[in-house]
Image (cartoon, coloured by chain):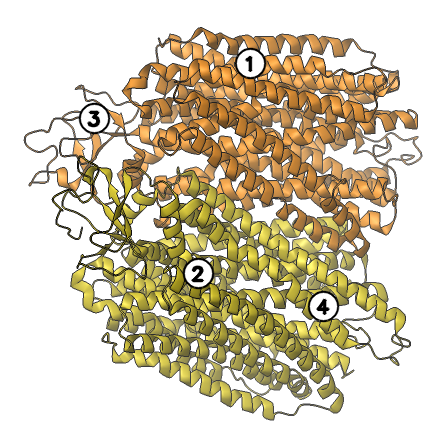
Chain colours: A orange, B yellow
Amino acid sequence: MNNIPVLWLIAPLGAILALIFAAIFFRQVKKQDPGNAKMQEIAGYVREGAFAYLKQQYKGVGIFFIIAFIVFQIMAWGLGVLHWLIPWAFLTGGFFSGLAGYIGMNMATLASNRTTQACTKGLNKGLRIAFRAGSVMGLTVVGLALIDISAWFFILNLLKFPLQQITIIMLSFGMGASTQALFARLGGGIFTKAADVGADLVGKVEANIPEDDPRNPATIADNVGDNVGDVAGMGADLYESYAGSILATAALGMSAVTMLGPAYADWAVKFVVAPMILAGLGIILSIIGIFTVSTKENAGPKELMFALNKSVYSSSILIAICAFFVTKALLPPDYYFGVFISTVIGLAAGILIGFFTELFTSHSYKPTREIANQADYGPATVILEGMSVGMRSTAAPVLIIVIGILAAFICSHGFSSIEMGLYGIGFGAVGMLATLGVTLAMDAFGPIADNAGGNAQMCNLPEDVRLMTDNLDSVGNTTAATGKGFAIGSAALTAMALLAAYLDEVRGALTLVGNKTGKAVFLHTNYNTKFTENIPLAKASIADFIQFFQIHILNPKFLLGVFIGAMVAFVFSSLTIKAVGRAAGEMVKEVRRQFKEIPGIMEGTGKPEYAKCVKISTQAAQREMLMPALVGLLSPIITGLIFGVPGVLGILAGALSTGFVLAVMMNNAGGAWDNAKKYIETEKKAKGTEIHKASIVGDTVGDPFKDTAGPCINILVKLMSMISIVFSGLIVNYSLHVENINPPFTKVHLDRKVENKVIMVDKDSLDVNGNYPPTTPPEIIIK
Amino acid sequence: MNNIPVLWLIAPLGAILALIFAAIFFRQVKKQDPGNAKMQEIAGYVREGAFAYLKQQYKGVGIFFIIAFIVFQIMAWGLGVLHWLIPWAFLTGGFFSGLAGYIGMNMATLASNRTTQACTKGLNKGLRIAFRAGSVMGLTVVGLALIDISAWFFILNLLKFPLQQITIIMLSFGMGASTQALFARLGGGIFTKAADVGADLVGKVEANIPEDDPRNPATIADNVGDNVGDVAGMGADLYESYAGSILATAALGMSAVTMLGPAYADWAVKFVVAPMILAGLGIILSIIGIFTVSTKENAGPKELMFALNKSVYSSSILIAICAFFVTKALLPPDYYFGVFISTVIGLAAGILIGFFTELFTSHSYKPTREIANQADYGPATVILEGMSVGMRSTAAPVLIIVIGILAAFICSHGFSSIEMGLYGIGFGAVGMLATLGVTLAMDAFGPIADNAGGNAQMCNLPEDVRLMTDNLDSVGNTTAATGKGFAIGSAALTAMALLAAYLDEVRGALTLVGNKTGKAVFLHTNYNTKFTENIPLAKASIADFIQFFQIHILNPKFLLGVFIGAMVAFVFSSLTIKAVGRAAGEMVKEVRRQFKEIPGIMEGTGKPEYAKCVKISTQAAQREMLMPALVGLLSPIITGLIFGVPGVLGILAGALSTGFVLAVMMNNAGGAWDNAKKYIETEKKAKGTEIHKASIVGDTVGDPFKDTAGPCINILVKLMSMISIVFSGLIVNYSLHVENINPPFTKVHLDRKVENKVIMVDKDSLDVNGNYPPTTPPEIIIK
């Protein structure tokens, strides 16, 4: 068993603390006044719809997981290209992510009417309940993620697995979480936008009734959508980011310490646990942060906003301080400070990206206002201006990420050891997400307030209650910007770390056995390889590795992979947008039918069939989420089988870069359109005019951009890396057997030292008869 | 002087033939009946406006060229990082491209009223004139491009420059053409869309008068726009593609022959001239093709279409046959067949891309019809469906290009010699564009027919004349699809070839001097380097080169470059779309003012001030084209100065992949929206309904997509590569002086053998005191 430092206990302890506080908060919220019978009835419909959806969703995803599990078992036992524990890690990742979503939504659907009721007594009271409910979500996500990571780490150590294998097995836990996240975001996003667009198109535009009107059959579905999309979907999304960043950094730590040389062998386990410990400390800071948020009883929206922002900034500063002590305690004296600075850079980058997101999407600033001004010329100019703003807004995040990554890379000695540089970058991502407990709480309370507003509207509560919930909602939207900055920034960093982990895994599948002549000899092993003699093995160096696979820009396999990656990002977006459109079309038909067929529905005497709309959204989400998911899941595998390792690296680089830029564009354009509409409603007071109608077109276009396609791409990119990692054994195996090996290498079957394995040797190291090893076997040494 | 094969004379001969026939066709068209006085007056306005614009445009671009010329002179004489002839080649490239645009537009503005007049006598008569006028454009473009290439090649050979330098100097001729093309497309695109959108928004929507109504002050500007955007802009665009593909392939040929080894030294000049000869033969085929197009007197639109398509397909088959004989005659027996097959693959890829472009944008097929069906739900769903179609339509071109490039690469022995593979890819691009003379003629006759229609409308000619010109226009649109396929395909291929040429140029700036110990020694030279001793020099091999610059996916400088490249494509698009929006806004204001202030304008008694609208579009185009152009021009230079060579390669890969996909998306979405609107007008007969209005929103959004941003990106990508090539000396020089050299290399100043040059040596090749060369200087040999 590896010598796990005692400090590591902070990780499981933090996780358990998070779960305890989540349970306490859950009970607190549940105890609150649920409001009058009508409010409870409406909330009950939403709750029922949400659980019906989740049941269906988990059934579908469950089938997918079972199929994947079987495929992985075949890969593990049949082909020997996967470790046998990986399918199990994959399962638990998916399970815990799903569980977090379930608990979060359970809380959110209980909290909505309680928030409404509290808002009748004041803004601050409403905030407290919504924020506490959001905290349950935040703490459940980080708690379950970290407890699962800790448990796996502990058990694998107990089973005396080597550290290198532990980190790789645990990465496949991340793949489970990513798969679950993609389905949750896709399904939730399609559900919520189908209901939203459907409700708006028929309700607002055709029947001329206000939003959240109980006469609209799609209203309940719309409110269910907020829960399944914005609560369960976002929870699974951030669960994946959080777990992914910790796991990728741990894997990079292992790789970094290997490359530092045998002198650093004792540090290995510390490199691996450091990100977990930082995450554990982050949870404790999050819990403190959640408690400090409560403000005075009679606080206004500005003060609430300030209180929330303060807690984000102070937790960022505190986590930076923690990072200093964690790195100092666990990393070698020459390296810890660089890694610490990388963490600070990561945090600063997150805050800056949040600021620029705000700048381009809030109607306090010029870009969104210009979109609103273009409404004078009609919908076409609104769309064009919004597209232009969205595209332009990609500059700042890209430059921040680029400069941040490079700075982190340099600080953590990346140019003398690429692996250390990548470890620093990973640590930056962990730093950004360490306080996810509190930032996610802030993200999650927005949709809860939104639902509370819907509840107020449908129960005909006084106008000022609705105003109160709207205020809460807008407070949530503003504070969420920083959270979004962290989410975007960490996604890019984690994706880059995963790319590195992929390379590392391939290098693992292809072991370098240098021989006396100084020529490279690659031994292609798999998990079933049994060494009959004691051959000292080492990982190929990056330079050897790159030469072997010809991973450079002139290898068309790599460059064409980049093309395919860019294309996959676009096609995936196309399919999600199309899916929303198709589902919304069905919803429109159903709402029209009910308006026509149910007598007295417009007078409020006939009752709309809410459940039918929920069912349509649920079924559409299930059906439509499959195609985009398959494109994302299969494209790296197919590319790998055709173009080999350079192709996979190409597709990952292409999808990562194009996907990141495209996601920022869609998120920001969508946000800006939304707020341009709000600006016209609140500042220009032009509700109901042609200008307003033009801005609604922008908002409707932006909906699937910002709530379906955009967030899904962020997950897609990471999932593609995860899949490449898990399938790397298969692809290396396959492509080495099928392909010609690039010169100067050649393939030789070698049965003497290892059982029936392929070995790739530099042609110069063969003897005159083309045999390897030469008649007098060379002494095999580590290069 | 290098031994130029006699066959080479086909190139200048073809060019001269093209110019002679262009002159003959020009006179033929000019001789035709120009129509009645009113028709001549209207045509005169358009002609006047077009020349006013061109004068202004060339003035602005001229200033830019002078500044660039001075900068290049400083780089050549002051810094010694550029060959002294490069600024001159740059100038001639820009000049001839501009000249081709001028002549083409001169012809187009003369042809419009003559086509209208001919249409009064029958469709076939109109087609002949429009097509002859288009042929003038086509033949001028290929003639001027090939004559300039031939002249430079001949003179540089006369001056006894080594072949390697000749190909590089000539590439900068391509950079002049690319710069001119970017400005022409940007200026023309902004002009035409500002006028178009401005005319539509006030005229059609607010004042409710039909398109091309003489009462609309922006009508003339709109017609001028068709000429400056679709004729002059497209001419410059394809001039650049045509010249770029020939020049890049010549440079790759040089590089390929070098890498084949000294045994092939005699083939060098043949490798370089082969693409020029193929282009010369292509011109002759084009002229034959133009003559075969004329059909029977009483042909209907279907027969015309068939006649045009037949000529494209037959010229593709003939050029493939020519490619066989050219490669057989000029390339070594082991290699010619592979290169020939690559050409065939290129042609097939072009035709296939054209087919899929048609599939996604013509309203004969499902995708565009589905956009039209979404109009039932309003403009938002039209936009969403169009975006989805555009994004989805990227799959086919990317896969065709990917498979085509890989197939061409393999056929031309790319895996044993990357350089030969790239030469094959370049040859594919030359094959696609060789018959540009006839395909461009087909592209150019669309806008001429469009203008003829405008003329008919404004002169109140009978309805059936307008119907005739509309028919002509739609024939042009359909046959243009194949041309577009070739343009897109060749752009991707040429850009990839230019990427390779960049690497080659950098490898040239960094000479490898292998020493006895087998360790790499790089000598960093520039154009002013004078060798005082006779050191045998060689280009670094790709493997050495990649190791030296650490060009691999884990070098963050490379990966971050990919991010920046993806971002530049989006920001560039944003700026162009924004520019169109701003210019259109000004136009709207002016048209509104004239409607308000000029008495009797709506009754046809007051005369609109056409010239003012032309002036607004002209000025807006001049002002607005600067920002996007600067982003494109400066981004590779700045990235290079900060991130060095890996950064430049990254930005090129990122911009190429994302830009290609984004351009296809915008072009196809725009085309599909346009045709969805036409489908609603012609098939659904729903002109004037809400459905129609919704489809107009799509069309308006699509206009800057397909006519400004989309085409500009294709040029941008190639221009970025060209700039990187020209600035490579500066960037290598700068980054080697500023940066730390990547391990295992180190920097040593070496004054003994070369004058004050920096030399990079593998640390192992230093002696114990860290001196290089070691006290006993090693014998320097070519590695």
- Label 2 sits on a secondary structure element that is helix
Amino acid type, callout 2: Met
How many residues crowd mark 3 within 10 Å: few (<14), some (14–19), many (20+)?
A: some
Residue at left offset 31%, top offset 54%: B507
- Say which residue label 4 marks: B195
User: Which mark is on residue A782?
Assistant: 3
Residue at left offset 46%, top offset 61%: B491
The quarter of the rendered structure image containing the N terminus of chain B is: bottom left
Q: Mark 4 near mark 1, Cβ–Cβ under 8 Å?
A: no
Q: Give the mark nearest the N terminus, 1 or 3.
A: 1
Above or below, A766 relative to B736: above
Q: Which chain carries label 1?
A: A
Q: Which of B260 and B503 is in front in this view?
A: B503
Find the distance from the CA under tag 4 to the CA under tag 1.
61 Å
Residue A531: percent from left, percent from top = 21, 20
- Label 3 sits on a secondary structure element that is loop
Residue A351: percent from left, percent from top = 62, 31
Q: Nearer the viewer, residue B653 or B644?
A: B644
Q: Horizontally, is A17 left or right of B140 in the view?
A: right
Amino acid type, callout 4: Ala
Residue at left offset 73%, top offset 76%: B220
- Say which residue label 1 marks: A281
Find the distance from the CA under tag 1 to the CA under tag 3.
40 Å
Residue A516: percent from left, percent from top = 13, 31
